[in-house]
């Protein structure tokens, strides 16, 4: 039997505000436990929330970017449930009047593209963190994350494969980082999603019973978790049983999903309007300011890179697709003449290195000044491209500047004809057998001579000059 | 010379003439609190710190605020840094806040001295002060009788002359009803007039802090200090605060006072009714005009209130879970067990009852029928008030249908009996309007209160009308005989 998959994603984006949604405590990641916590975050008796407008501005920027309707009057609701890392016994969220309504996101898989509609996006505060395995017989609570602003983005159930779900999350990542709405750091939980997955017989119009996979935080796991879940549901249905509507967890170590304890989803959240907050109204002036300060989006950058810097559409698209790469490109090119060489390096060596290390460029030791210097040294023939690669490797490990490396290792390229001619003469003299061979038609031997010259110069000879002089001498 | 029963104005004269120092005054106030400890007004006395503070205070006659050096008592739900704040609940019986409520801070910034924290109904839920974990408070007018609630300790401390004034909070009548039962003046300001920061919540959309004192004039002095926008409470009102003493003496000639038809005063105890008619006459003699007005939805106030207030309470009290502060049960086997035991042990019956009612009113399938409908009715009640205040200046009602009653005589079998105590006071909380209770005589040697309700932000009119009444009567100067305590 043929089955088709229906997926809806609820994405939690941690907004990159300096302070929390309802308190002035810092949101810095990685602080010691319970240090980014003030009276409000730990829900002391008598405290009251007051809103951080910056979070609203970021949510609105996201809404504008996806073409959504913005509710300029925001009302907050309380979602009541008990958990040890939820200090007030309720989460402040938006139920009836989300700040962002509608809109859509375009996703790309292999050669095709598809538009996924967004139901809504609302602001809410994050909970703290429970740590169950560090203290024998006790759980520990870290409230640093409690009160951090989240934008929960709910998609329509229009995603039809794990691949599309990954593409959706990648598009989401690109968008939120571009908009400076979030740092998008999935490993730190800044971007994570719950996937609602169901299957139905091909052609059926109704929806099957869905399960919700909670808190998936990498592209790889999204794909694996959903694929596992689809297979599991097919197996259940084909055995004649029914899929149970439930919340499941993805265990990446075992590569499987399994049900969470039933207690955790038997909650009646008793939503009601938060009486401690008046409706928050965003004025038309504030809306205008957000629009005026709107950041340039990837497609706009792509076009500008082609027009202003003469990049190929392929190069422009790859560089513009990542916010950190585009930022790096733009800050490097102010001191670079050869833009396409810079682009080639970004797409080639630099991307390869970053992919290998699984980091973003801003997390590496590479600075835009140093990369600009490297490109300029290659461009002005101080060094060859090959030496450039060796220098780049060193830059990656210790962050030193290309000029420092060239100076300390004496890597400056030999470009003057006289010096190179002298070395070429030596090579020809010492390898008369090969010279005979070449002259008798073994043209492949040309590479051998180049190699010998490079060996004698430790790779510093300008390859073009070497080629030119070798050709002259060997055809004499 | 005793400072007992002295008003703030009288204490200012004593301080200004150097008849008494701030230290002596503070010392005397604390001595009175100890002398009448059997009244059980205080949960915690702030003896050492208040004497220390008093000793450092230099009262400069010219520049001093009217509260400089004046001893005050704070209801025990205002957080006070370093000083235990219990809400009269076991669950917070050891809670020492790391910060101070805006109200207390403002009063202390103006020079007042907090001598202690007053007893109250647990989490302000009750109308008799009997739900306190620390035991009931005696009405200074009659031993074994309740002072009213929930600000019972504050009202009794002022009525017994221990402090000239105290803070209270009023969610459904919790300032006005105990003020009436104890024969003092109590004001519930407009919702948002005073910051709620640091005031432990019962029902957020109804709770409002206010003063209890021996006169409307003293209430005005406290209100001047307590009022104002606070960025830490976004529901506080960003509007000008007048000097409430300025026009307090103004004539009330031509003021239009409404009597609410729906309250059927003829059903009241005849003596309470008689007091009301006499005060009406007194106001007529002062030049006020009376009109009968209709607030068609006001009879729904009690059920509306008892849907909204418990709903908010059930959520507000979720934070008392034994995890971060407050009482934590011992020998619990898991997190759920910790919640259940800590909360079962920590909360009293009335608090549990309201958490249950509120949880029910917010539950899936019941929300529309209870909470949502109650909010709609609340809007209707508010509209009724808006309508009548187009043509009148003030409304007048009894504060309470009865005088103070004996301990354990009401609401034991049927809690609703006690809920009806709030019949006249609740609607101004629902509508967010200011209201004041002033003493206007006695029935069977127990004080009776008169309530005036004002329009939005018109505390000035309430204080003016109350003050003029007090200038022309002596009810507020009556003192209980405390020989029996």
Image (cartoon, rainbow, N blue to C red):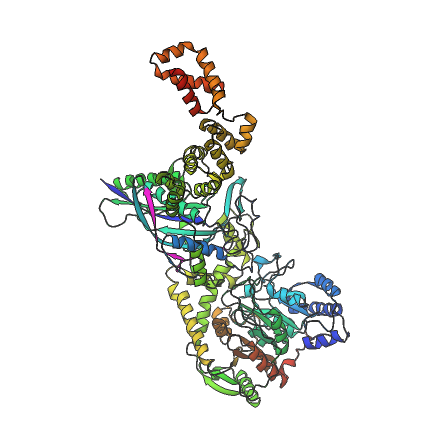
Residue A89 is a magenta residue: yes
User: Residue A103, located in which quarter of the rendered image?
Assistant: bottom left
Q: Of all residues shown, which one is farthest toward the top?
A: A433
In which quadrant is the C terminus of chain B drawn?
bottom right
- Position of residue A311 measured from the top left corner of the image (x, y, whole percent): 38, 40
Residue sitting at x 38%, y 17%: A446
Q: Nearer the viewer, residue A222 or A58?
A: A58
* Relative side of B144 to A470, left or right: right
Say above or below: A220 vs B328: above
Say above or below: A86 vs B308: above
Could you tell me how many numbered marks the image carries?
Answer: 0
Residue B5 is a magenta residue: no
Q: Nearer the viewer, residue A268 or B56?
A: B56
- Position of residue B280 measured from the top left corner of the image (x, y, whole percent): 54, 86
The boundaries of the magenta stretch are A88-108
Say above or below: B273 vs B54: below
Task: Tell me, yes or no, if residue B239 can be seen here.
Answer: yes
Task: Tell me, yes or no, if residue A248 can be seen here.
Answer: no
Q: Nearer the viewer, residue A97 or A33?
A: A97
Q: Nearer the viewer, residue A11 or A435?
A: A435
In which quadrant is the N terminus of chain B drawn?
bottom right
* Relative side of B272 to B20, left or right: left
- Position of residue B267 measured from the top left corner of the image (x, y, whole percent): 47, 82
- Position of residue A351 measured from the top left corner of the image (x, y, whole percent): 43, 35
Say above or below: A332 vs B199: above
User: Residue A279, located in which quarter of the rendered image?
Assistant: bottom left
């Amino acid at each position: 039997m043929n089955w088709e998959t229906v997926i809806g994603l609820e994405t939690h984006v941690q907004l990159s505000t300096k302070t929390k949604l309802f308190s002035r405590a810092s949101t810095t990641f990685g602080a010691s436990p319970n240090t980014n916590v003030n009276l409000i975050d730990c829900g002391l008796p008598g405290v009251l929330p007051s809103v951080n407008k910056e979070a609203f501005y970021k949510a609105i920027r996201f809404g504008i970017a996806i073409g959504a309707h913005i509710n300029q009057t925001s009302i907050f609701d309380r979602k009541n449930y008990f958990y040890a890392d939820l200090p007030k016994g309720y989460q402040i969220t938006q139920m009836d009047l989300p700040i962002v309504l509608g809109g859509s996101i375009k996703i790309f898989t292999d050669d095709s593209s598809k538009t996924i509609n967004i139901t809504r996006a609302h602001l809410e505060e994050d909970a703290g963190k429970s740590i169950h395995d560090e203290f024998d017989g006790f759980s520990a609570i870290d409230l640093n994350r409690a009160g951090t602003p989240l934008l929960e983005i709910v998609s329509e159930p229009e995603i039809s494969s794990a691949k599309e779900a990954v593409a959706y999350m990648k598009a989401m990542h690109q968008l939120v980082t571009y908009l400076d709405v979030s740092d998008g750091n999935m490993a730190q939980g800044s971007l994570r999603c719950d996937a609602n997955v169901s299957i139905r017989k091909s052609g059926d119009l109704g929806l099957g019973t869905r399960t919700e996979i909670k808190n998936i935080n990498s592209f790889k796991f999204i794909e694996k978790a959903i694929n596992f879940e689809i297979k599991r549901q097919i197996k259940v249905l084909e055995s004649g049983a029914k899929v149970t509507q439930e919340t499941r967890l993805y265990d990446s170590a075992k590569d499987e999903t399994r049900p969470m304890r039933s207690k955790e989803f038997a909650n009646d959240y008793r939503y009601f309007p938060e009486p401690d907050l008046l409706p928050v109204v965003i004025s038309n002036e504030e809306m205008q300011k957000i629009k005026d300060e709107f950041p340039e989006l990837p497609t706009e950058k792509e076009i500008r890179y082609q027009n202003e810097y003469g990049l190929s559409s392929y190069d422009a698209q790859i560089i513009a697709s990542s916010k950190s790469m585009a930022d790096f490109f733009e800050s490097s090119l102010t001191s670079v003449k050869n833009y396409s060489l810079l682009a080639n390096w970004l797409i080639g060596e630099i991307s390869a290195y970053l992919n290998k290390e699984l980091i973003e460029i801003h997390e590496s030791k590479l600075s835009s000044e140093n990369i600009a210097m490297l490109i300029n040294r290659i461009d002005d023939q101080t060094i060859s491209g090959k030496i450039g690669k060796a220098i780049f490797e060193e830059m990656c490990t210790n962050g030193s500047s290309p000029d420092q490396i060239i100076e300390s290792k004496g890597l400056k390229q030999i470009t003057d004809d006289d010096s190179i001619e002298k070395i070429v003469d030596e090579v020809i003299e010492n390898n008369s057998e090969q010279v005979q061979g070449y002259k008798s038609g073994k043209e492949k031997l040309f590479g051998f001579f180049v190699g010998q010259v490079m060996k004698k110069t430790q790779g510093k000879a300008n390859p073009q000059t070497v080629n030119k002089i070798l050709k002259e001498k060997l055809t004499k | 010379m005793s400072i007992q029963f002295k008003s703030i104005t009288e204490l200012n004269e004593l301080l200004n003439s150097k008849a008494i120092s701030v230290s002596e005054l503070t010392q005397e106030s604390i001595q009175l609190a100890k002398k009448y400890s059997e009244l059980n007004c205080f949960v915690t006395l702030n003896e050492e710190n208040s004497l220390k503070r008093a000793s450092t205070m230099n009262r400069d006659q010219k520049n001093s605020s009217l509260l400089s050096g004046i001893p005050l008592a704070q209801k025990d739900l205002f957080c006070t840094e370093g000083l235990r704040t219990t809400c009269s609940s076991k669950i917070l019986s050891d809670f020492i806040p790391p910060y101070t409520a805006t109200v207390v801070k403002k009063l202390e910034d103006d020079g007042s001295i907090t001598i202690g924290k007053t007893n109250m109904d647990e989490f302000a839920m009750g109308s008799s002060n009997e739900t306190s974990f620390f035991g009931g408070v005696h009405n200074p007018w009659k031993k074994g009788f309740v002072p009213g609630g929930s600000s019972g300790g504050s009202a009794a401390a002022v009525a017994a002359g221990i402090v000239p004034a105290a803070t209270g909070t009023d969610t459904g009548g919790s300032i006005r009803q105990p003020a009436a039962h104890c024969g003092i003046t109590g004001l519930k300001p407009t919702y948002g007039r005073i910051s709620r920061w640091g005031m432990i919540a019962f029902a957020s959309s109804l709770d409002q802090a206010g003063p209890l004192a021996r006169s409307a004039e003293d209430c005005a002095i406290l209100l001047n200090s307590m009022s104002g926008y606070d960025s830490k409470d976004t529901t506080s009102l960003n509007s000008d605060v007048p000097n409430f003493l300025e026009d307090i003496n103004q004539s009330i000639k031509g003021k239009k006072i409404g009597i609410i038809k729906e309250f059927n005063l003829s059903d009241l105890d005849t003596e309470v009714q008689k007091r009301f008619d006499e005060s009406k006459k007194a106001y007529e003699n002062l030049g006020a005009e009376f009109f009968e007005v209709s607030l068609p939805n006001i009879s729904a106030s009690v059920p509306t209130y008892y849907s909204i207030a418990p709903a908010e309470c059930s959520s507000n009290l979720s934070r008392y879970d034994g995890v971060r502060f407050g009482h934590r049960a011992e020998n619990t086997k898991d997190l759920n067990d910790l919640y259940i035991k800590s909360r079962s042990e920590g909360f009293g019956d009335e608090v549990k009852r309201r958490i249950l009612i509120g949880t029910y009113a917010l539950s899936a399938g019941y929300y529309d029928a209870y909470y949502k409908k109650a909010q709609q009715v609340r809007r209707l009640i508010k509209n009724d008030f808006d309508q009548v205040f187009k043509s009148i200046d003030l409304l007048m009602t009894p504060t309470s249908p009865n005088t103070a009653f004996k301990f354990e005589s009401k609401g034991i079998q049927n809690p609703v009996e006690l809920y009806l105590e709030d019949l006249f006071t609740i609607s101004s909380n629902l509508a967010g309007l200011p209201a004041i209770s002033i003493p206007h005589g006695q029935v069977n040697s127990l004080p009776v209160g008169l309530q005036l309700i004002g329009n939005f932000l018109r505390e000035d009119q309430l204080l003016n009308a109350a003050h003029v009444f007090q200038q022309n009567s002596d009810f507020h100067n009556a003192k209980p005989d405390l020989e029996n305590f």
